[in-house]
Amino acid sequence: MPDIYDTIHGLLQQGEDVVFARVISDKGSAPRGTGASMLIRQSGEIYGTVGGGLVEAAAMQNARELFKSKHSTTFAFDMTGDLLEGKMVCGGKVELLLEFIPADTGTLSIFETIAEHRRDNRKCFLVTPLPGHGGVGGRHWLLSGHDSPVGNEGEDTEVLARLKDSVRELTGSSLVEYDGKRYWADVIINGGTVYIFGAGHISREVADLALRVGFNVVVLDDRDEYANAQRFASPIEVVVLKSFDKCFDGLPVDAGSYIVIVTRGHLCDKVVLEQALKSGAGYIGMIGSARKRDTIYRALMEGGVSAQQIEQVHCPIGVKIDTETPEEIAVSIVGELIDIRAQMRRWKNQASRQ
């Protein structure tokens, strides 16, 4: 299922202009927080949400004008008034950026570069100067990561360099100010990469479901009769290991990564878990009964692993529902991944505001 950046990229490739709406600030009981986004097509079709109700209706109404003027704008929406009959009033305030995105060569190049970063699991930043009081937004963009900025030719290189330094430390999409001007910085990352160790029946179901809810998926096993493209279709990445020893070597695992351990047996699970605890992954889950868990934990602690490290592990893995089939077990596991991802995003949003 494509996300909003994939969808924008696809529509630009077809020559279709779009309006990209983002909540750039919120206060009080707003329906969606800063960073929420929605894509609006000229047909009126939308992807994503900035809160529904009156906020969304106002965004769509403004977007119709932007398709005509080919400009961008910001607007504030105040929901602190009395409850209106049949209408949503949450008691908060939001400010939205509505950005007209033309399907021209320069813009398409930027979204192609974003797609490349995402395929390589590289974090990147899309920085947009906010339009002035006249409502006319510049079309120039800045994509800033570890590489040189990509944007319109002739832009002030000093401003780009300063902005790049400012956004590099962001953990969530945020407003950035420089020299009295405001910029919106989209922090663009994938939904997170799930590394599934083991390529059996449960792994197959987990991989398919995790992909559908926006995760990148990598499946690793030392059995090529299980770890192959016939069982795991693209874009799921399949890695055939020589063994589970040193199976984390070369993997770009970080705090935004999820480790799911569903190998064929206790010994392999133990080997993978010991390495996972040193990987810095944001989530580690292992399938198995309480008895299996305790046996593996005891062996690891006898080998020097601390109780604090063990506490990181989700085992038995998954949300607590009664499951029997591989499909049902996958729902439990991916449900927990979704919940952990949401917690990570909330933490990042809170950290970016401090």
Image (spheres, rainbow, N blue to C red):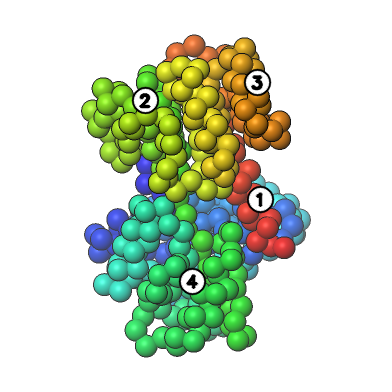
Which is more N-terminal, label 1 or label 4? Answer: 4
Disc 1 target residue: 347
| Label 3 packing within 10 angstroms: few (<14), some (14-19), many (20+) | some
Which is more N-terminal, label 3 or label 2? Answer: 2
2 vs 3, front mark: 3
Which is more N-terminal, label 1 or label 2? Answer: 2
Q: Gap between marks 2 and 1, in whole Å? A: 32 Å
Q: Gap between marks 3 and 1, in whole Å? A: 32 Å
4 vs 2, front mark: 2
Q: Gap between marks 4 and 2, in whole Å? A: 40 Å
Which is more N-terminal, label 4 or label 3? Answer: 4
Amino acid tagged 2: Ala
Mark carried by residue 298: 3
Disc 2 target residue: 199
Q: Are marks 2 and 3 in contact (CB under 8 Å)?
A: no
Disc 4 target residue: 127
Q: Is any atom of residue 59 visible in this view?
A: no
4 vs 1, front mark: 1
Amino acid tagged 3: Arg
